[in-house]
Image (cartoon, coloured by chain):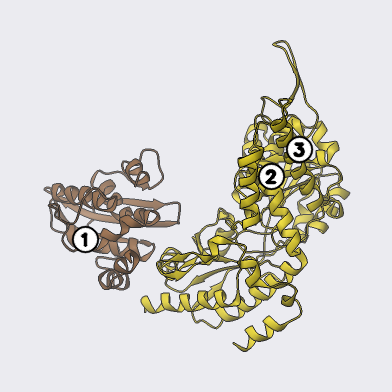
Amino acid sequence: MITKSLYQEVILDHNRNPRNYGSLDNANRSAEGHNPLCGDHLNIKLNLSEGYINDISFQGESCAICKASASMMTANVKGKTQADAETMIQEFREMTIGKLEPNDKHHLGRLTVFFGVRDLPTRVKCAILPWHTLQAALNSVATISTEADDDPMHVSIGNA
Amino acid sequence: MKLVESLLKSPNTSMFDVEQIRADFPILKLKIDGKPLVYLDNAASSQMPQPVIDRMTKYQTMQHANINRAVHYLSETATAEYEKSRHKLKNFINANEEREIIFTSGTTDAINLVAHGYGRKFICSGDEIILTTLEHHSNIVPWQMLAEETGAKIRVVPINDEGELLIEEYKQLFNKHTKFVGVTHVSNALGTINPIKQMIEFAHARGVPILVDGAQTAPHMNIDVQDLDCDFYTFSGHKLCGPTGIGILYGKAILLERMQPFKGGGDMIASVTFEKTTYNTIPHKFEAGTPPIAAAIGFGAAVDYLSSVDLSAIEAYERNLINYATEQISHIPGIRIIGSATEKVAVLSFSVDRIHPHDIGTLLNQEGIAVRTGHHCAQPVMQHYKVPATTRASFSFYNTMVEVDALISGIQKVQKVFL
């Protein structure tokens, strides 16, 4: 069953011991993400200079799927260029809504543990919230919501 | 298992045979990923027994036409069956007359009807509307919309940590500006049964009408609107083994007659010219357009079914279920029960240390167990307890002690995953 494969050890581990959790002193970009449907919220801070994400952190209250997604995301984008991160945001989104298949070319690495979430439409937003918030931070948008009209991913998620 | 045996043998539960009842509900035979369905989301929507399904099929197969229209056989049959359903609902809640029963699309629709039909006519700037912390959003938002439009104010009755309304505070909220009270009979998020008879008496002593949201009451206990003496009472068909898309608003005839219509259209008029329209009498004044006829007839069949089971026996059986569930769950470490009112229906809202309700819900689903996770459309309740969401198991008379055990071991399994 899909949910079994979703709650696998790597996700549980990142939930238990989230990487890059906390605040960031030298942050020059940040954003706050909310999912009003379940009350989840998280804050992402990052240091972006010369096109590189030098450092990144997150903090917040959320379910295991959201927290693990945030933890793995920060670990994966740290040290990457903004352009690389944006490619990953796009690919992660496409993976969770079923537009990107496991055999397609992608740059997600172990993040493919979230493939199963596409079969749980009510949980897609949990997995995607950190990515969504990262995109806002990179683009200097202060707050985003999974339910806002101007949410760039709202329509696609809703159709998932 | 000792408690189960003693509960199963207690006189209250011997009044009906739960296995025989379960046989009436085809959906309860379902397997979810090979595991028997344990449906504990009854406060969101209940399941439908075969007699109700059959009644709706019979209507759709052999009796359907539009009502209140044509002189032909089918239209007359459909009209008669639709009105028969109104008669059943009247008896079900012991209303005085059929015309006091308005078919609506559900509880939300009924509350909007009153906020519009009564509120926009009789509530003005500076007037006050009393609501409670326990309300579902559907008994908050229509009044907020009214308040925003008219300049009226909303006053809110607080709760204690057990999830019970503070009745002394309720009484303190009344003043010369108080024009209306809206209160839920039973909290959907916590299961608390409010002392509405006392609240109605107090409001009436001050000449203030009161609406009771009965969405969570109807499938669990007897309702007698004349004994309660409430001005408005409302509930939905799909929470009491009937179909979605149908509900009723009970209103005292004298109030319904003075109210303005909610929706305009066919059926709700006496005559129409471009110069002036005169409205039909109640209940038709509030039933514009073609109603969901099959759903209304199914609603009547659901009421028949519940009456055949006997609501007093249901109430006693469900009390045993919730007592057993509460006792079993309190043995699990890290569990916090949200809402422990002395008077409550079979709703068990809880949180588990370090585990988010959505993770609990997804993992319980893996065991075939359906619970609701989230804020239950009652965010003020969540704010009181300072939690974003809870997990809620809500029981019906077709649930069993074995299913309670399945829930308990399901929660323990979830805890193991997150160890």
Which corner quadrant holds the N terminus of chain B? bottom right
Which chain does brown denote in the image? A
Give the crowd class for mark 2: few <14, some 14-19, many >=20 residues within 10 Å: many
Q: Is residue A94 left or right of residue B13?
A: left
Which chain does yellow denote in the image? B
Question: Tag 2: residue type?
Answer: Ile
Give the crowd class for mark 1: few <14, some 14-19, many >=20 residues within 10 Å: some
Instruction: Find out whether the residues at labels 1 and 2 contact each other: C-beta distance under 8 Å.
Output: no
Q: For the residues marked 2 and 3, what is the alpha-carbon distance in whole angstroms?
A: 10 Å
Q: Are marks 3 and 1 on the same chain?
A: no
Residue B36 seen in render: yes
Q: Are marks 1 and 2 on the same chain?
A: no
Give percent across and percent down for residue A157: 34, 46
Q: Which residue is mark 3?
A: B80
- The quarter holding residue B295 reads top right
Give percent across and percent down for residue B19: 63, 72
Nearer-the-camera pick, B251 or B366: B366
Q: For the residues marked 1 and 2, what is the alpha-carbon distance in whole angstroms?
A: 50 Å
Question: Tag 1: residue type?
Answer: Thr
Nearer-the-camera pick, B273 or B158: B273
Question: Tag 3: residue type?
Answer: Ala
Q: Which residue is mark 2?
A: B297
Q: Which residue is mark 1?
A: A112
Q: Which one is in front in this view, the residue at disc 3 or the one at disc 1?
A: 3
The chain letter for the residue carrying disc 2 is B
